[in-house]
Image (spheres, rainbow, N blue to C red):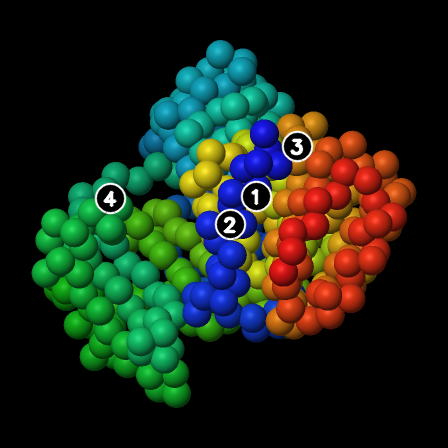
């Protein structure tokens, strides 16, 4: 059945590789850097950005001591995992919620004891949840008003821009859709940086008044300094809040980094938390392969992210379900092809493998050599459908005679 689906897939999408939507820029696929919340706050703190006072704890006793050291009116305890929706999550210890408020330091210790070492399940985690190994103990501050502020790279401006809204604490997409007039944008000159008048204007647009306007403008400039310092592609603060005591504080932030700057941001990239990463994705990353596991049974083996996504879509269109997204990239070597097959065949859900290669940059002979070696050495037990088109594709056909369960589609 899977073979029939794949045959129909290629009949319908024969000219897919000639579509103008594909870009064959030779780049190494990389796994995006993931930082925990406390790590992002630490980076902001080091740049003079105002954040809540906080400590990090790995044990319940450390959490209790941290709560006592804070000496705060109210304390917030947050489980540290790389997933959203923690507040509504559930632990396998029975505790509900990965974010808790309390005024009693002793309660912090009790709660931490039910968080650390237990799995937290949210809408963004796997079904079994993610084990919590660290908690953040922070000072809880009241917020009288929430705003949104971000600095990001904008292709249309050929550089960074500031984006802000007085409507914070909610999805900025919702604000843009319902009240677009409340979205304010300022392009930043990369040679001048954020000017005082720009920062003050943005602070005013966010609704800060009087002394708070100047304080907010100062935070905006410090956030831009952080943006440059860590080679970020985005610094998003939601909310940038105002407290009853007259403070402007960055309560929650998301930082995206330019992976091409890893060579000069070694201290930042050393903080990468890989303990929650999928083992197969990590194994793929070691061979410069971009892999994302899906829930289907047809494994995809494709070069180029655009072609990989289109191949997954067209499989689904014809009644199949892709088991993964696997992008070999343009500079793939025979060893990488072999290792990619090891990853695909190790998945027990896989009932068929589809190879869809456009030989624009990659040499089809390299792909063929890697596949035939994998077929022989890994004792392939599932059907394999191969489509090679482009550079040296015609010369690869004799090689398939050495493999069983291989279906080569004609060019």
The image's mark for residue 11 is 2
Do the residues under discs 1 and 3 have CB atoms within 8 angstroms? no
In this figure, which residue is indicated by the disc labeled 1?
A: 7
Instruction: Say if 235 sits above or below 339 in the image.
Output: below
Residue 361: name its quadrant. Answer: bottom right
How far apart are the alpha carbons under marks 3 and 2? 22 Å
Q: Earlier in the sequence, mark 4 or mark 1?
A: 1
Q: Is label 2 or label 4 in front?
A: 2
Label 4: which secondary element: loop
Q: Is label 4 or label 1 in front?
A: 1
Residue 96: name its quadrant. Answer: top left
Label 3: which secondary element: loop
In this figure, which residue is indicated by the disc labeled 4?
A: 170
Q: Is label 4 or label 3 in front?
A: 3
Q: Is label 1 or label 3 in front?
A: 1
In this figure, which residue is indicated by the disc labeled 3?
A: 350
Instruction: Say if 12 sits above or below 226 in the image.
Output: above
The residue at the point 38 percent across, 83 percent down is 190
How far apart are the alpha carbons under marks 1 and 3? 17 Å
The residue at the point 67 percent across, 41 percent down is 353
How far apart are the alpha carbons under marks 1 and 2? 6 Å
Do the residues under discs 4 and 1 have CB atoms within 8 angstroms? no
Q: Position of residue 155 (x, y in %)?
A: 36, 74
């Amino acid at each position: 059945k899977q073979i029939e689906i794949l045959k129909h897939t290629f009949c319908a999408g024969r000219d897919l590789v000639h579509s103008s939507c594909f870009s064959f820029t030779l780049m190494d696929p990389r796994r995006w850097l993931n930082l925990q919340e406390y790590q992002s706050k630490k980076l902001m703190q080091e740049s003079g950005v105002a954040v809540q006072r906080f400590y990090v704890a790995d044990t319940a006793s450390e959490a209790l001591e941290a709560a006592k050291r804070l000496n705060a009116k109210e304390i917030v305890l947050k489980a540290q995992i790389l997933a959203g929706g923690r507040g509504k999550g559930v632990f396998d210890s029975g505790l509900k919620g990965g974010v808790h408020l309390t005024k009693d330091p002793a309660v912090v210790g009790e709660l931490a004891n039910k968080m650390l070492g237990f799995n937290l399940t949210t809408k963004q985690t796997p079904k079994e949840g993610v084990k919590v190994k660290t908690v953040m103990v922070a000072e809880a501050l009241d917020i009288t008003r929430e705003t949104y502020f971000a600095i990001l790279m904008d292709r249309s401006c050929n550089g960074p821009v500031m984006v802000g809204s007085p409507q914070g604490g909610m999805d900025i997409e919702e604000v843009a859709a319902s009240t677009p007039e409340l979205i304010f944008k300022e392009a930043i000159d990369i040679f001048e940086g954020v000017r005082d008048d720009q920062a003050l204007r943005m602070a005013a647009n966010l609704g800060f008044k009087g002394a708070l306007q100047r304080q907010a403008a100062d935070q905006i400039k410090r956030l831009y300094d952080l943006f440059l310092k860590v080679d970020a592609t985005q610094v998003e603060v939601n909310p940038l809040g105002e407290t009853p005591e007259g403070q402007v504080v960055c309560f929650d932030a998301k930082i995206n980094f330019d992976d091409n700057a890893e060579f000069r941001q070694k201290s930042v990239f050393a903080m990468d938390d890989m303990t929650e990463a999928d083992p197969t994705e990590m194994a793929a990353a070691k061979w410069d392969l971009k892999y994302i596991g899906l829930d289907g049974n047809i494994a995809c083996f494709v070069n180029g992210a655009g072609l990989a996504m289109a191949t997954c879509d067209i499989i689904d269109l014809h009644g199949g379900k892709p088991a993964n997204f696997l992008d070999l990239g343009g500079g793939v070597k025979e060893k990488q092809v072999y290792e990619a097959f090891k990853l695909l065949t190790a998945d027990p859900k896989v009932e068929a493998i589809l190879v869809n290669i456009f030989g624009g940059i990659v040499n089809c002979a390299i792909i063929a050599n890697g596949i035939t070696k994998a077929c022989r050495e890994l004792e392939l037990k599932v059907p394999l459908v191969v489509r090679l088109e482009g550079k040296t594709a015609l010369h690869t056909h004799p090689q398939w005679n050495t493999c069983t369960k291989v279906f080569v589609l004609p060019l």
